[in-house]
Amino acid sequence: MKDNLLREISEIKNIYNLPLAELMNKAHTIRMKLHPTNEVTWIIDRNVNITNVCISQCLFCNFCRTKKSKDAYITSINEYRKKIKELFEIGGNQLLLQGGLHHDLDLKYYVNLFKQLKYEFPELKLHALGPSEIVYLSEKSELSYEYVLKELIEAGLDSLPGAGAEILSDRVRKILSPAKCTTHEWIEVMRVAHKLGLVTSATMVFGHIETIDERIKHLILIRDLQNEKPENVPGFLNFVLWPVQLSGTRLEKKIKIEKVNISEYVRMLAISRIVLLNIPNIQVSWLTVGKDVAQLCLHAGANDMGSIMIEENVVSSAGVSKNIMSIDEMKQTIVEAGFIPKIRNQKFEIIE
């Protein structure tokens, strides 16, 4: 088994090292077979942080605070109401709802929060939490992942983000985020989520202390997990690739790390499209790489631009300027790249 994995990593690495134009062409050919209509999708949603208090204190995170921090917070119901109304006013109905692993927030808190938000805003879609939060809530309550997920689904959870994956290598995780879930735990939560029929996404944050082999193994783990899902459930509908943002972080102060350049990001996105044949959509992170690079990636395997990002606080705290892309700008960005913009929901259904 180990020999087969090493052999496959070596084979994929050979493709990864092809000339960039050739690699982009291979990825784009696959993308056009999967999505021959020349459409590029995007979504209107809002990323609201439940809290900035987190026990994990990951080395690459500038957003997290301790309970004693002067600027520590838990988002209030009135703040949710205001943010959701603003979201609805511009045509969106989904909250990407995430936050830290707060000592005092248990499963009951999230169940009550989801129920109240859905009661007040029945049309609201909750793309919320992630495997790290599910593992934390499971350990805190001494309940199984399945029980925790079922309770959250009943309370209003619509889909589960792939947050907290970073690099699925315990060597990396023990250095960067030792208090966060392990590779096995992240995989197991997603395995259970798939069995329960939840729409999920997969992610990677790269460009820190991981090796190329660890990046490729990350892709293989996600691909193999997708292969396990029951036939009648969605599983991972998209894969999102972020270059790590390090400005002012403890990791930057501890280790000298070269910033991911344009060609490296495009190369990694292209190999993601080539390896993840069973995941229908590849999303480019325009927020972290900029609109020009995002347009290039639409010719290197990506077919989704993600959200217009009317609010984002986590990566912005590590050096990304708080850019906001209007609806018209999103459409224009896609058109200028030679594609047809189509607004979608989290199930990747086109909204006419």
Image (cartoon, helix red, strand yellow):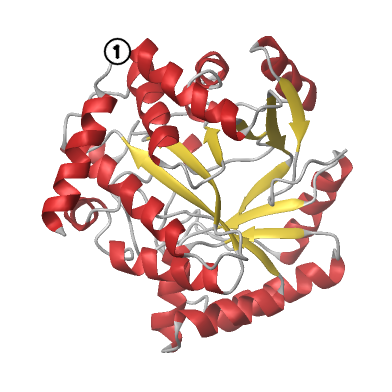
Classify residue 12 by image quadrant. top left
Query: Could you tell whether 351 is left or right of 193 in the image?
Result: right
Image quadrant holding the N terminus, namely: bottom left
Circle 1 SS class: loop
Image quadrant holding the C terminus, namely: top right
Residue at 44% across / 85% down in the picture?
A: 144
In this view, which residue lies farthest toward the bottom? 142
Crowd tier of the residue under label 1, counting other residues whose Cα lies within 10 Å: few below 14, some 14–19, many 20 or above? few
Residue at 70% across / 71% down in the picture?
A: 114
Q: Position of residue 45 (x, y in %)?
A: 71, 44
Whether residue 247 is situated above or below residue 232 in the rendered picture: above
The answer to whether residue 182 shows anywhere in this view is no
Q: Position of residue 28 (x, y in %)?
A: 50, 22
Q: Position of residue 35 (x, y in %)?
A: 64, 32
Task: Report the residue marked by disc 1.
Answer: 19
Under mark 1, the amino acid is Pro
Residue at 84% across / 51% down in the picture?
A: 85
Q: Position of residue 24 (x, y in %)?
A: 42, 18
Is 196 or 166 nearer to us in this picture?
A: 196
